[in-house]
Image (cartoon, helix red, strand yellow):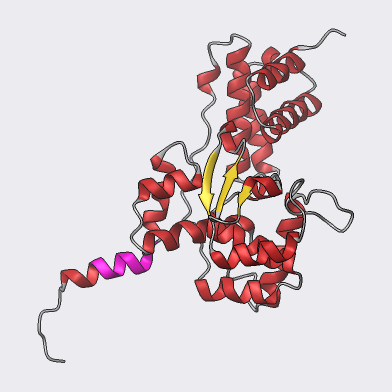
């Protein structure tokens, strides 16, 4: 069966080893353009593509979503051989500092979670810094419970790495898996591998039961990852080691946490001792 240009482009992404999530995103964005405009982006002028992006923005797309659309369209135009793709400039995204949960809040979430499985998930996410997709892809045999080591296979960018988890997490996982020695680590009531959406819902529910206001701190798996990174930094762990544990390819990605660690910042500020000895 003959493929059109977009289908050939998607096939190229698969050959490059892009993740299913990335491929799904590219396919969705290009097909949305095709359905709305009625033409392949490669056959449209830069002005037409910019008009499309402007319409998306006015229809309610936020800056982050618009940025992804612009990047995908640029990549596609470059692939088909267009030299004017650089005229499409993705919007600048303001850098938001990640929110983090306190150790006390995370403990409350673990205690509020109903099942041993859910307690183990929250604690493993927090103490290892895994992404939710990485957690859901774990098999029992990926864990070394004696040494508290987890091997992440095919993480973001198809990279393998190891991380660690605490004795408390080990104890909960042992209780949860029982005699199982292989297969998916976390399973649903049908015995199938848990999906990220299931984990996200469970963590949101645990946060609510723990009394953490959703409007104040939205409890998500990624927030546990942010908390892991920030708390390590608070305890003076070298940022290069945190980079390895998180699986970041660039140190610049990890460095956002240096702007979040308020307690560390305040400690260094107080060491400067700017007091003038003024009596008030």
* Percent position of residue 20, x then y: 71, 32
- Quadrant of the rendered structure where residue 269 is? bottom left
Q: Is residue 277 above or below residue 106?
A: below
The residue nearer to you, when weighing 207 against 7, is: 207
Q: Residue at x 38, y 59 (%)?
A: 233
Q: Is residue 213 visible?
A: no
Q: Residue at x 47, y 47 (%)?
A: 245
Q: Is residue 87 above or below residue 224?
A: above
Secondary structure mainly formed by the magenta segment: helix
- The quarter of the image holding the C terminus is bottom left
**In this rendering, position of residue 197 left or right of residue 101:** right
* Percent position of residue 83, x then y: 53, 11
The residue nearer to you, when weighing 25 against 175, is: 175
Give the residues drawn in magenta, as a range.
Answer: 261-268
* Percent position of residue 101, x then y: 53, 68
Task: Please check the rendered image and state whether residue 53 is part of the magenta-colored stretch, yes or no.
Answer: no
């Amino acid at each position: 069966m003959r493929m059109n240009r977009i289908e050939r482009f998607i096939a190229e992404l698969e050959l490059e080893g892009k993740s299913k999530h990335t491929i799904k995103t590219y396919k969705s964005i290009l097909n949305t353009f095709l359905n709305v405009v009625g033409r392949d982006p490669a056959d449209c002028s830069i002005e037409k593509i910019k008009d499309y992006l402007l319409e998306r923005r006015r229809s309610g797309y936020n800056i982050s979503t618009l940025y992804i659309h612009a990047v995908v369209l640029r990549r596609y135009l470059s692939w088909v051989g267009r030299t004017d793709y650089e005229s499409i400039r993705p919007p600048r995204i303001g850098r938001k500092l990640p929110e983090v949960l306190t150790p006390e809040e995370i403990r409350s979430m673990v205690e509020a979670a109903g099942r041993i499985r859910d307690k183990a998930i929250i604690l493993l996410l927090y103490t290892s810094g895994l992404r939710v997709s990485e957690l859901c892809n774990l098999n029992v045999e990926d864990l070394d419970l004696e040494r508290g080591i987890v091997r992440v296979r095919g993480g973001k960018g198809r990279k393998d790495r190891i991380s660690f988890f605490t004795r408390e997490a080990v104890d909960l996982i042992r209780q949860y898996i029982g005699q199982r020695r292989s297969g998916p680590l976390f399973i649903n009531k049908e015995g199938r591998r848990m999906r990220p959406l299931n984990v996200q819902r469970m963590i949101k529910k645990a946060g609510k039961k723990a009394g953490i206001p959703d409007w104040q701190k939205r409890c998500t798996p990624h927030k546990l990852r942010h908390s892991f990174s920030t708390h390590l930094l608070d305890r003076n762990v070298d940022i290069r080691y945190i980079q390895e544990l998180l699986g970041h390819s660039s140190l610049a990605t990890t460095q956002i946490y240096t702007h979040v660690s308020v307690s560390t910042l305040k400690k260094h500020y107080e060491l400067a001792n700017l007091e003038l000895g003024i009596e008030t």
